[in-house]
Image: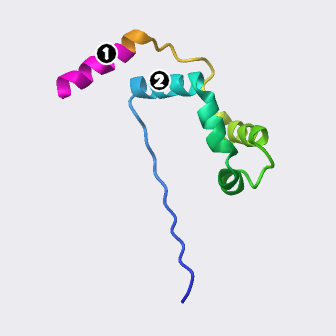
Amino acid sequence: MGRRTTSCSGLWHPEADKLALMREDIDRNSHRLKAVLGEEGMRRELFDGVSDEEKAVEAFVNQNQESALKTKPKVGISLFLKHCSTALRIL
């Protein structure tokens, strides 16, 4: 029996305010993203097997340089509360 390969891709463009909230969360909790990037399987598959988390983060930054933010998003508690109130109305 031959080997099977599956390849998937996609493009996701969340709304600007939701994207800003995600970026803010990554900024405040970067250790979580760094831990994922530092996993051996991720380093092997995405970053040509770099040796450690620090090099994986560097490779990630280099790969995403073109689409990286130049300034920190201006998102605060008011935007968060807006989303909460919208979610509560939906429920």
Number of disc labels: 2
Nearer-N-terminus badge (1/2)? 2
What residue appears at the point 19 percent right and 27 percent down from the top-left corner? 90
Instruction: Classify residue 71 as left or right of residue 84.
Output: right
Q: Residue under circle 1?
A: 82
- Residue 81 lies, in percent from the top left, at 34, 14
Which quadrant, please, contains the N terminus?
bottom right
**Residue 14 magenta-highlighted:** no
Instruction: Classify residue 20 as left or right of residue 31.
Output: left
- Residue 56 lies, in percent from the top left, at 73, 43
Label disc, if present, on residue 20 of the rendered structure: 2
| Position of 22 relative to 60 (above/below) | above
| Position of 85 relative to 3 (above/below) | above
| Position of 79 relative to 11 (above/below) | above
Instruction: Classify residue 8 as left or right of residue 82.
Output: right
Q: Label 1 neighbourhood size at 10 Å, few (<14), some (14-19), many (20+)?
A: few
- Residue 8 lies, in percent from the top left, at 49, 60
| Magenta-colored span | 80-91
Quadrant of residue 77 in the image? top left
Q: Is mark 1 on a helix, strand or loop?
A: helix
- Residue 16 lies, in percent from the top left, at 42, 26
Residue type, numbered disc 1 = Lys
Which quadrant, please, contains the C terminus?
top left
What residue appears at the point 67 percent right and 57 percent down from the top-left corner? 45
What residue appears at the point 40 percent right and 23 percent down from the top-left corner? 17
**Residue 84 magenta-highlighted:** yes
Residue type, numbered disc 2 = Ala
What is the C-alpha distance between the residues marked 1 and 2?
13 Å
What residue appears at the point 67 percent right and 48 percent down from the top-left corner? 39
Main SS of residues in magenta: helix
